[in-house]
Image: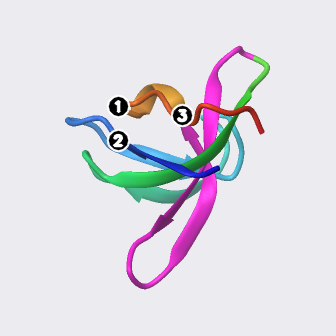
């Protein structure tokens, strides 16, 4: 099930190729951007990342976004 969340105000957030800050950036999201979140994973550091989707009107982006950067805390279901 896909749900919606929003990036926190006052900071940029990134959709990445994997669930780590070292992974390549797929898209940069401005503060308050809406994202579709499907499910979450927990990385080796114990941090949760949601598998997310955005559509900027010209392209669709899929990847992982750090749950702490989302107002609602990310997806509720494990992938």
Cα distance between the residues tagged 2 and 3: 10 Å
Q: Is residue 51 magenta?
A: yes
Within 10 Å of disc 2 (Cα), the crowding (few <14, some 14-19, many 20+) is: many
Q: Nearer the viewer, mark 3 or mark 1?
A: 1
The quadrant in which the C terminus is found is: top right
Q: Are marks 3 and 1 in contact (CB under 8 Å)?
A: no
Q: Are marks 1 and 2 in contact (CB under 8 Å)?
A: yes
Residue highlighted by disc 1 = 71
* Element type at mark 2: loop
Quadrant in the rendering for residue 71: top left
Within 10 Å of disc 3 (Cα), the crowding (few <14, some 14-19, many 20+) is: many
Mark 1 and mark 2 lie on one chain; the one further toward the N terminus is 2
Cα distance between the residues tagged 3 and 1: 11 Å
Estimate the x, y position of residue 51 in percent, counting from the top left: 65, 47
Q: Going by the picture, which residue comes out furthest to the left?
A: 10
Above or below: residue 66 compared with residue 48: below
Indicate which disc residue 66 carries: 3
Estimate the x, y position of residue 56 in percent, counting from the top left: 39, 73
Stretch of the chain drawn in magenta: 45-66
């Amino acid at each position: 099930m896909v749900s919606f969340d929003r990036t926190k105000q006052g900071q940029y957030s990134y959709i990445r190729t994997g669930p780590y800050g070292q992974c390549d950036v797929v898209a940069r999201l401005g503060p308050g951007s809406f994202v579709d979140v499907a499910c979450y994973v927990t990385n080796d550091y114990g941090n949760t990342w949601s598998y997310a989707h955005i559509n900027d009107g010209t392209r669709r982006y899929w990847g992982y976004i750090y749950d702490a950067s989302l107002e609602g805390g990310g997806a509720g279901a494990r992938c």
